[in-house]
């Protein structure tokens, strides 16, 4: 079986990381997988790039320009919306022709247009689409927040003045899917449940399979050596916060700031022995707001270095306000690091409350503080670390995830063949 994984980027972003890990897991477990990307960043032979063309830049700029016009020339929400009005037709590429299964991932920002996706569906090849956010099930947004218009039809979109563009894109997505079959894979049960409520996907297949992780790379290391390599203090306890862009409001850093303030105020004995490490862009902008010593580590892309950072920490805190199945939580747990987060999205599926960490009530900084104190308790640490490693081995290992995807591919192929046989 030959699978073509299609993603906008090769390495940048959570979806790219997950797609790469899936490709590796499939190739290690009997499925021949290859990636097709717009933004190729390495010399990996298993990753192909779109043919060089000025149109790729044009596709990106034209989509942003149209959105900008509908935003009445404002930048707010400019990159929270995708309308897929332009993209590359990949059906004529040799990588597409050679594939038995087409596996879409995050294909936004000018990678594929809705018309291009329709051509993929009309090719007759089985199509699987992994959802890294809710965009495939809505008109234009990647995170719905408290909006449920997609249950019936996206209109009066809160991200747009007037919202007529959302209705137009919704109808185009309906036309794109009309008479076609797609197997949608959500990375969390939470996202799968959300997707099943979408009127767009009411007659499509939606299943849930988590992302995979390489436990040979992400694994426990000596903490003292890891701290020395990262320039972190050898003594005391370290709380880790990770985000590609630390200041992203969706990642909830303001609640981390408040929780640390409460920690210093209510638990001075714990606070006096604790520091914070921040991994990600714009870390310096947050450092001055925290009531404990802070070590901004900046943005890091080298996997080995990222593993060292996780292993240097005692706990990992991710106070996201909306998230699917964060790679960062999985990475931390694979290194035996207990996690603390809010009860939102797929996070409670990953963090077992008082088993592998602590799940706080959403937007409750005081409960987040309670979770930090709980996870930092040295008496709890050995049991939490052991449970983290067991959870990852059972749910997120390459073998486990590859097996489930192979079953999805085989079923999608059977459905595709059956539909072809029924055609007049």
Image (spheres, rainbow, N blue to C red):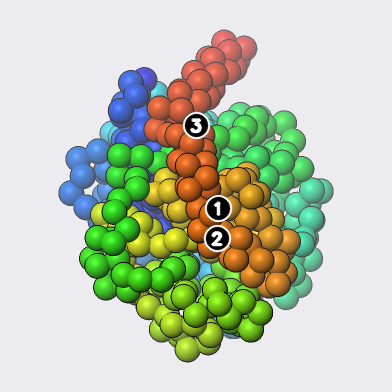
* Residue 125 horizontal/vertical position (percent): 47, 26
Residue 198 visible in this rendered orientation of the protein: yes
Q: Are circles 1 and 2 on residues that touch, CB within 8 Å?
A: yes
Residue 117 visible in this rendered orientation of the protein: no
* Residue 102 horizontal/vertical position (percent): 44, 32
On screen, 223 above or below 199? below
The residue that label 3 is drawn on is 394
The residue that label 2 is drawn on is 377
The residue that label 1 is drawn on is 380
Q: Residues within 10 Å of mark 1 (few under 14, many from 20)?
A: some
Q: Of the residues tagged 3 and 1, which is closer to the observer?
A: 1
Q: CA distance from mark 3 to mark 1?
A: 21 Å
* Residue 1 horizontal/vertical position (percent): 36, 20
| 50 or 32: nearer the viewer | 32
On screen, 384 above or below 58? above
Q: Residues within 10 Å of mark 2 (few under 14, many from 20)?
A: few
> Which residue is located at x 45 percent, y 53 percent?
337
């Amino acid at each position: 079986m030959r699978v073509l994984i299609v993603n906008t980027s090769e390495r940048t972003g959570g979806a790219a990381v997950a797609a790469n890990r899936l490709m590796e897991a499939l190739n290690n477990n009997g499925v021949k997988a290859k990636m097709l990307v717009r933004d190729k960043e390495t010399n990996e032979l298993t990753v192909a790039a779109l043919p060089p063309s000025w149109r790729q830049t044009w596709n990106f700029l034209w989509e942003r320009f149209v959105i900008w016009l509908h935003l009445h020339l404002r930048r707010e929400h400019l990159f929270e919306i995708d309308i897929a009005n332009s993209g590359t037709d990949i059906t004529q590429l040799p990588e597409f022709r050679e594939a038995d299964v087409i596996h879409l991932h995050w294909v936004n920002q000018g990678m594929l247009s809705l018309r291009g996706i329709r051509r993929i569906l009309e090719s007759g090849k089985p199509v699987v689409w992994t959802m890294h956010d809710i965009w495939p099930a809505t008109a234009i947004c990647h995170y719905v927040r408290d909006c449920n218009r997609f249950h019936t039809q996206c209109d009066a979109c809160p991200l747009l003045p007037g919202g007529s563009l959302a209705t137009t894109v919704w109808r185009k997505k309906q036309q794109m899917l009309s008479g076609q079959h797609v197997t949608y894979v959500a990375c969390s049960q939470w996202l799968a449940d959300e997707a099943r409520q979408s009127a767009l996907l009411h007659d499509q297949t939606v299943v849930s399979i988590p992302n995979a992780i390489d436990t040979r790379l992400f694994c426990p290391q000596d903490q003292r050596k890891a701290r020395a390599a990262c320039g972190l203090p050898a003594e005391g306890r370290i709380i880790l916060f990770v985000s590609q862009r630390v200041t992203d409001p969706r990642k909830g850093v303001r609640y981390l700031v408040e929780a640390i303030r409460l920690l210093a105020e209510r638990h001075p004995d714990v606070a006096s022995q604790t520091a914070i490490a921040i991994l990600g862009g714009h870390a310096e902008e947050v450092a001055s707001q925290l009531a404990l010593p802070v070590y901004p580590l900046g943005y890091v892309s080298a996997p080995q270095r990222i593993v060292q950072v996780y292993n240097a920490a005692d706990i990992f805190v991710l106070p996201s306000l909306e998230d699917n199945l964060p790679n960062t939580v999985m990475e931390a747990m694979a290194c035996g690091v207990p996690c603390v987060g809010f009860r939102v999205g797929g996070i409670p599926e990953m963090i077992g409350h008082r088993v592998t960490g602590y799940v706080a009530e959403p937007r409750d900084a005081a409960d987040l503080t309670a979770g930090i104190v709980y996870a930092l308790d040295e008496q709890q640490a050995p049991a939490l670390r052991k449970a983290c490693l067991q959870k990852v081995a059972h749910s997120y290992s390459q073998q486990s995830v590859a097996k489930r995807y192979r079953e999805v591919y085989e079923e999608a192929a059977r459905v595709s063949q059956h539909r072809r046989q029924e055609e007049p």
